[in-house]
Amino acid sequence: MKNLYFLVTFCASVMLTVPATAQSDYKPGYVVMPQGDTLRGQVSYRTDLAGKTIGFKRDNQSATASYTANDLAGYGFPGDRNYRTRTLDHADTLAAEYVFMQELVRGTMSLYVYKGTYFVEKKDNPDKLHKLYITKEEYVNQYGVTALRDINHHVRVLNTLMLDCFAMLSKVERVKLAEKSLVDLVREYNSCAGDPEGQTTFKESKKWFAIRPGFVGGISHTSLEFSAKDERYLHLEHAEFNSNTQPTFGMSLLLYSPRINQNASLMLEGRYGQNSFQADPSYRWFDAYYDNEISFDLSAFKLSTAFRYDFAGKTVQPFVNAGIFHNFMQRREYRHTQYFRQTQNSTPTQRNRDNADFVTNAQKGFMFGAGSYLNINKRRLSLEARYEHGLDLHKQDTMSKTGQALDSNTKTITILLGVYL
């Protein structure tokens, strides 16, 4: 129990330190003043929550100056993101305002993204932004059923703007409203209709797709609980199983796109672990006495899929993740011996209730966790506290109509150490 309290406390402390560490979000960059002068220093990698203010420091010791889109022509980071100040008129529903838009391609046609929405702008009309978007429309299909279909306004807009390059028209029809598809299309148009050498693609050195492999290992502390609504499972309802601490180890893969968002990734992780639970519940039922010896011996290959987000940080970099997992059982032994007595002092009758099919082949569950990387050269060391909640350890299909008569779950707190290459 002391180990459990320690792991819970550690997990909570790690999660509380994440927001504080994430505040130091400055990288080498530049700001462009309205007159065209460029100041180099440390720039906050993200804007404020409203997306309108950034921080700038000449160096790590200087005071922080805050700038809005009204104060700058733009800002950016060498070899990475670039932002330009543009006027957003909100389709005439609100007053026009200056905002920082991330610039993806600059040329005869420029491509921007702002809060997940894409815009294009042509060099011969630099004050006109064209929004690329999709809407839904109701229609009655051939079966007389009302359904929804996409209205691809972005295709109409791009067709109109790219009329001066006939070869692009068939490609516009197939373009997706996604960064890679739009970047490729705008680059090709600029090569066709403008000066291909005069265009700039930002973040070009960053890959569209990358995999970071790693090895993980640690300690898991697991408890097992049952809740029964049927008299056949009273031995599990009354059982208080021991919690146990066991080692776990495996491999992890982080799949991410440095070009789109280098902080977000999909984690695929496979780990091996084992558990052993015992309980000796005794209870009285209809004036009879029941003593039980119950044990579970389990081993499983755990496959986890989770969304992971890395916060800013150079040497120490916090992260959080959340997702689901499946425990594919390698060993699932369930042993149950019951001793039945008519009276308290009568000789017990022994009953063997072992059931090789009681435990499920694959247990599902959800997980979340928080931790920090320690960045050393090109490698990352990680320390993470993770909570994993497993559902239905018992095999539902063997219980037929009594499936709702029994609930089971496992609760695991894991401390993981990892090395990512």
Image (cartoon, rainbow, N blue to C red):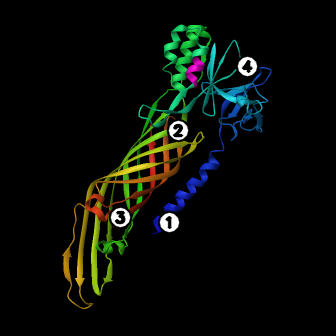
Q: Is residue 107 visible?
A: no
Q: For marks 1 and 2, give the CA distance.
A: 31 Å
For residue 78, what is the image quadrant?
top right
Type of the residue with mark 3: Gln
Residue highlighted by disc 4: 127
Q: Secondary structure at mark 2?
A: strand
Residue 113 seen in the figure: yes
Q: Nearer the viewer, mark 4 or mark 3?
A: 3
Q: Residues within 10 Å of mark 4 (few under 14, many from 20)?
A: few
Q: Position of residue 22 (x, y in %)?
A: 62, 45
> As rendered, which of 413 and 71 lies closer to the eye?
71
Residue 120: image tag: none
Mark before the other along the chain sequence, 4 or 1: 1
The alpha-carbon separation of the residues under discs 1 and 3 comes to 32 Å
Regarding mark 1 in the picture, which secondary structure is present there? helix
Amino acid type at circle 2 is Ala
Q: Amino acid at mark 4?
A: Asp
**From which residue to which does the magenta span run?**
153-158
Q: Residue at x 28, y 80 (%)?
A: 291
Secondary structure beneath dot 3 equals helix
Q: Is residue 405 left or right of residue 124?
A: left
Residue flagged by tag 1: what amino acid is it?
Tyr
